[in-house]
Image (cartoon, grey):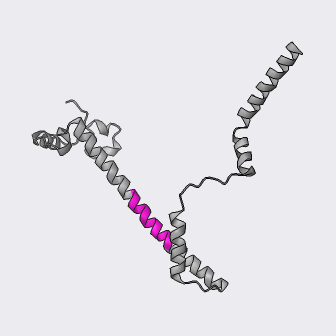
Amino acid sequence: MLYPRATPLLPRWHCPQWHLFPISTAMSQAQAQQSPVELPGHSLTLQETLRVMDVAREMRDQREQAEEMFRRDDIRVALREKLMRTARLSGDNVTEAEIDAAIGQYMETLHTYQDPQPGMKNFLAHCWVWRNRIIWSMAGVAGIAGGLWYFFG
């Protein structure tokens, strides 16, 4: 006897070594007699597997884009309702066509980049971004000028 037997009066979860007992020999024999089933993905080459994975990734991306489009439509509807309610409360006579045109124009330019207008604010922003480079350059020029004045002055 390979496995110790529990008393028949106790269920197996009362025995501390229940996991050592064979569950069913009939079940293991049935599994051994089954013929091996060939799954569709086992005979694919590496290239075919990668192609299938690319198709799956593309399908997931398209599904995410479709869900985003549906969310965008929901956002449009909610925005239209909010603008109509605001227009009624403020007493403006605005039609739904005008609001739809405004929402369409807003959504078209929502994620577009425009260069900033040149001016003093733009210049100061660039100076702030490049401040370390500017400071080190000015320190280098001052060091060279001081060295020249010291040696030749």
Is 70 drawn above or below residue 65 in the view shown? below
Q: Please tell me in which quadrant of the rendered image residue 39 appears.
A: top left
- From where the camera sits, is residue 109 visible? yes
Q: Residue reaching furthest top?
A: 151
Q: Quadrant of the N terminus?
A: top left
Residue 32: percent from left, percent from top: 13, 39
Of residue 87 and residue 52, the one placed in the foreground of this image is 87
First to last magenta residue range: 64-76
Q: On the picture, is 30 further left or further right than 9?
A: left
User: Percent position (x, y) of residue 52?
Assistant: 26, 45
Instruction: Please provide percent x and percent y for residue 18.
Output: 31, 39
Viewed as shown, does residue 145 lie left or right of 57? right
- The kind of secondary structure the magenta stretch mainly shows is helix
Residue at x-position 54% and y-position 57%: 112
Q: Is residue 149 above or below residue 15?
A: above
Q: Is residue 10 among what the camera can see?
A: no
Q: Is residue 66 above or below residue 98?
A: above
Query: In the rendered image, which quarter is residue 44 located in?
Result: top left
Whole-percent x and y of residue 20? 28, 35
In magenta segment, residue 130:
no
What residue is rendered at 29% in x and 48% in y? 55
Residue under the image location 76 percent in, 25 percent down = 140
Q: Is 71 part of what is drawn in magenta?
A: yes
